């Protein structure tokens, strides 16, 4: 029989773990967008070396497991750089570097949906490239790619339990810790699953609202 009494007594710990999950996922997503934009600009650069680095990076990240990338950032990167990263920072960095490769492909697909004539017309009016990107291209690009970008953030939330292997106490690691105390694994992981569902359901609802606002603004 299920008995949630002891597990629910640990609810504050679960909520704390959920906040860590959201924090590491949100920071990873925001930094991933920055990495993705940088990769997009590198792939459009005139210098072939930059294009080659971007293509190799995207292929490597997409072709290797996230868990291996987390281990590399946490264990190998400090030895290469001499910078010892805390577990939380290493987790955020690993998620952002991974997400950036996928975001780059999302943004590249979105760029193909924007008529090339818009940028050409803006340049013909004498606008600087920074203005063309900031005022013409990027607003449309993020509107077009909003659904897949949100989906990428959802995938980061679902991938965040992998950070438990480097001692980040997010929601799944919290469930493991509570299970070790209460000896109620089913109840602990059911509660964690419910919290994951609530977070992602709210995210989905907010996304639909933002898409509605964006559509109303465009019309």
Image (spheres, grey):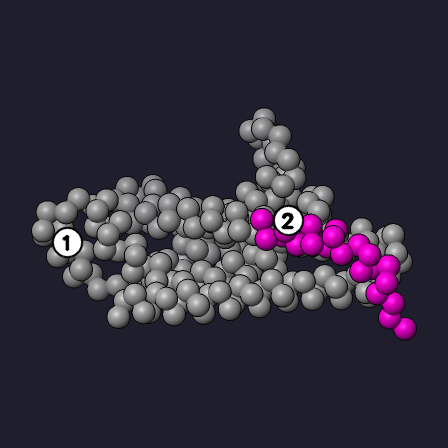
Image x and y of residue 25, in percent: 56, 52
Tell me which segment is drawn in magenta: 1-23
Left or right of 85, for residue 116: left
Q: Quadrant of residue 75?
A: top right
Identify the residue at image location x=57%, y=44%.
92
Residue mark closest to the camera, 1 vs 2: 2
Out of 14 and 47, give the one closest to the viewer: 14
Out of 210 and 56, give the one closest to the viewer: 210
Residue for badge 2: 20
Quarter of the rendering occupied by the N terminus? bottom right
Image x and y of residue 5, in percent: 86, 63
Out of 102 and 168, give the one closest to the viewer: 168
Identify the residue at image location x=58%, y=48%.
24
- Indicate whether residue 10 is drawn in magenta: yes
Residue for badge 1: 122
Magenta span: helix, strand or loop, mainly? helix
Compared to residue 113, the image places residue 163 above or below, namely above
Out of 168 and 9, give the one closest to the viewer: 9
Query: Is any part of residue 59 visible from this angle?
Result: no
Left or right of 79, for residue 130: left
Image x and y of residue 211, in percent: 40, 67
- Indicate whether residue 93 is drawn in magenta: no
């Amino acid at each position: 029989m299920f008995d949630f009494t002891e597990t629910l007594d640990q609810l504050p710990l679960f909520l704390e773990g959920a906040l860590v999950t959201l924090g590491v996922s949100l920071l990873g997503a925001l930094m991933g967008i920055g990495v993705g934009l940088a990769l997009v600009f590198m792939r459009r650069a005139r210098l072939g070396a930059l294009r080659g680095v971007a293509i190799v990076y995207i292929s490597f990240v997409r072709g290797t497991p996230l868990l291996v990338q987390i281990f590399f950032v946490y264990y190998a990167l400090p030895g290469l750089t001499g910078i010892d990263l805390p577990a939380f920072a290493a987790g955020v960095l690993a998620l952002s570097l991974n997400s950036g490769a996928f975001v780059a492909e999302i943004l590249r697909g979105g760029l193909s949906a924007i008529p090339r004539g818009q940028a050409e017309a803006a340049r013909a009016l004498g606008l600087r490239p920074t203005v063309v990107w900031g005022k013409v291209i990027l607003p449309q690009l993020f509107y077009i790619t909003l659904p897949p970008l949100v989906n990428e953030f959802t995938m980061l939330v679902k991938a965040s339990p992998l950070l438990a292997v480097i001692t980040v106490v997010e929601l799944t690691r919290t469930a493991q810790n509570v299970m070790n105390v209460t000896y109620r694994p089913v109840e602990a992981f059911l509660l964690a699953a419910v919290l994951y569902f609530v977070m992602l359901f709210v995210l989905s609802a907010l996304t639909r609202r933002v898409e509605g606002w964006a559509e109303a603004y465009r019309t």
